[in-house]
Image (spheres, grey):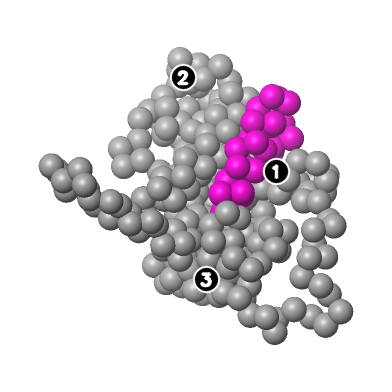
Amino acid sequence: MSTRTAAPTRREQILKEAARLFAERGFHGVGVDEIGAAVGISGPGLYRHFAGKDAMLAELLVGISGRLLEGGRQRVRGAGAAPRPMGAPGVTPVAPDPDAVLASLIDGHIDFALDDRPLITLHDRELDRLRDSDRKLVRQLQRQYVELWVGVVREVHPGVPEAQARGAVHAVFGLLNSTPHLGSYGTGLPGRTAMESLLRRLAHGAFAALGDPGGEPAGEPAGDCAREPAGDLSGNRDEGHSPYT
């Protein structure tokens, strides 16, 4: 499920251009007039949609965190479920296949990582500019998204400790969300379709490594990572990692 809509509203157009400009030049390097010019309206006209740049930033970061979580939940509900024909109430849906659910989650996050790269940059640079309440909401949504993945990964690999599964999820997020560093397609890099395929293979390979009992370095028990609480982007130990890292 893509994090983008097929026919963006004017408000969504404003947010898209704001994200692009903020990511390219920094939050304080962009004026309201410049955002307005990018969507063909006057700077003051933006105030009919947003109270200011701070409101745009909050909606961008809270909004993408919410869409990722809801999209993930929909994929968990929908992957592998058998259809229910009309007038056949006795048909029992098949339990979703954990491998199919994980594959669907990976595909959805790859769409985000390739199509919404400015939001990854924006999160890394500007999250601390949000009000405390908005920043806490972003973290709450992100933690729920991470735990959604952890639950699915442990269904695919039931013998893997929870902390190790969580570490794998964060590692895959780090892999997929490296896309802002790719530059433009066609400059020595594969195109979008090829990049999507490559990221998919890498993500599946990373999770497959959890099922390799010979992959644990000698002298490093699998559960050791449980002693280290997760940290946020700034290294704090009490808020949990972001799916943007």
Q: Main secondary structure of the magenta part?
A: helix
Whether residue 179 is visible, yes or no, is: no
Up-down: is 231 above or below 226? above
Whether residue 69 is visible, yes or no, is: yes
Query: Which quadrant holds residue 144?
Result: top right
Give the residue at mark 1.
125
Give the residue at mark 2.
49
Distance Cα–Cα, label 3 vs label 2 = 41 Å
Distance Cα–Cα, label 3 vs label 1 = 29 Å
Residue 31 relative to residue 42: left or right: right
Q: What element carries label 2?
A: loop
The amino acid type found where label 3 is placed reads His
Q: Nearer the viewer, residue 109 or 129?
A: 109
Query: Which quadrant holds residue 158?
Result: bottom right
Q: Nearer the viewer, residue 84 or 182?
A: 84
Q: What stretch is highlighted in magenta?
A: 127-149
Q: What element carries label 1?
A: helix
Residue lying at 60% horizontally and 38% vertically, measured from the top left: 141
Query: Which quadrant holds residue 175?
Result: bottom right
Residue 224: x, y in percent? 83, 65
The amino acid type found where label 1 is placed reads Arg
Q: Which of 145 and 46 is in front in this view?
A: 145
